[in-house]
Image (spheres, rainbow, N blue to C red):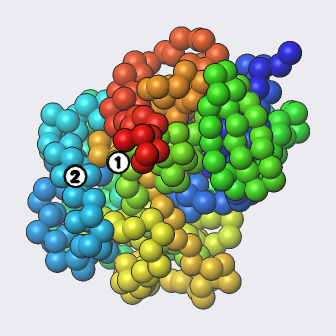
Amino acid sequence: MAKTISVIGAGSIGVSSALHLQQRGWQVTLIDRREPGQETSYGNAGIINSGSSIPLNNPGIHKSLPTYLKNKSPQLRYNIKHLIQNLPWAIQFLQNSKTTQALKSTAALNELTSRSLVEHKAFMQNAGNMHRLKELGWLRLFRSGNSYNPDSFEAQNHKLYGIPGSVLSADEIHDLEPSLKPIYESGYLLEGAASINNPGALVKEYAQKFVSDGGNLLQTNIKSLSVDGNHIECLTDNGPHTCEKLVIAAGPWSNDLLAMLNYRVPLNVERGYHMHFNLPEDTVLNRPLHDVQRGFIMCPMEMGVRVTSGVELNNRDAPPNYAQLEQVKPFIKEAIKLGDATNDPIWMGRRPTLPDSKPVIGQAPKHSNVFMAFGHQHIGLMTGPITGRLIAEQISGESNDIDMSAFAPERYVRFEGRRKPIWQM
């Protein structure tokens, strides 16, 4: 009889986990309330880069804190009420930005990011969508008065892990991207980086491969979860669904699902926004770029140029706040000639983040048949295939080729036990 397992969450992490489990002989059901790749993964900048192992909460954030506290920066905005309500998370997040902790986080995340491109290529070859990948690097660009700092925490770690890159002059930037206006005095090219031309479509195509190979895709909402010995029941809008094992890979909604099993997780979200623009016929953007001072990323996509804003710390389900995106629009026009915005709606996404910026990947503390894979903040699309392999190996009794202790759920996942009815207290 086939081994049955369900994966909740059809983003990059969940779809990748389903594929790797399927390859190991599991009968897999992938569950999500939406179609695959339509939430957090959809809005990703599409960059696959080993250098993205540097967490946002690193020592470099300290000098920017006075600016961020003004709450007018395109790089970071916050809702003060939300931060007060989540003060323990915020304090731990800042504590983990100290050098010692940030070095540990970077080392752990590098184990994921350094393997990501190889794992994606394997998926793409199977799914037949290698055309979505471009390997032209990623540009960091600096305006007047600023330049790449070789002594920064980021630069030192790029050197430590052998991540290739080169400093560029204004002329060299023009040679790479002739359509950019001459406002950038210097740049830095992360040479080994690649990019995806449609992250949502990529994940959807991975899911289609999963289904074509016999996987079950169930689009429904989870109403409750319960564990009874060796069986797990997922009560959905379509009725009950039973399996032997379960993977929770629902990104920013993972804590809601775990609460159904009496777990508490200090999961916060880094909200972000993007919109798409057409480019005039005489304008071309070849690779993604990051305007460091103005706090936006521009990426060439299948649907036009995607412009992403910085981080917004706010309640996951609060109404959108487009202030950061509006703030960077004039800066984008300073950098390149833009056409009109496309008809695509402005996207708002929620990046799930734990206090040390590392995901949890592994078995639940009190349930041997429940597993977790979430909390990848900005790098979920990139690290989906490697995370999927690691969790599938654990579930299947195989050994991992990296030290998984840095991603252990016990770091933050707390089991509160079954609450007694009030008359038994």
| Mark positioned earlier in the residue sequence (2 or 1) | 2
Instruction: Report the disc number at residue 88.
Output: 2
Few, some or many residues within 10 Å of mark 2 (<14, 14–19, 20+): few
**Left-right relation of 29 to 165:** right
Q: Is residue 109 visible?
A: no
Residue in the image at 37% along x and 22% along y: 405
Quarter in which the N terminus is drawn = top right
Identify the amino acid type marked 1.
Answer: Pro
Q: Secondary structure at mark 1?
A: loop
The location of residue 371, given as percent across then percent down, is: 55, 30
Q: Which residue is mark 1?
A: 266
Residue in the image at 21% along x and 43% along y: 96
User: For this rendering, which residue is in front, 100 or 47?
Assistant: 100
The location of residue 219, given as percent across then percent down, is: 77, 54
Above or below 94: residue 278: below
Above or below 140: residue 421: above
Above or below 84: residue 19: above
> Residue 163, located in which quarter of the rendered image?
top left
> Residue 6, located in which quarter of the rendered image?
top right
Find the distance from the CA under tag 2 to the CA under tag 1. 9 Å
Quarter in which the C terminus is drawn = top left
Residue in the image at 47% along x and 25% along y: 366
Above or below 86: residue 13: above
Few, some or many residues within 10 Å of mark 1 (<14, 14–19, 20+): some
**Left-right relation of 284 to 108:** right
User: For this rendering, which residue is in front, 288 or 309?
Assistant: 309
Identify the amino acid type marked 2.
Answer: Pro
Q: Secondary structure at mark 2?
A: helix
Residue in the image at 76% along x and 26% along y: 4
**Left-right relation of 1 to 175:** right
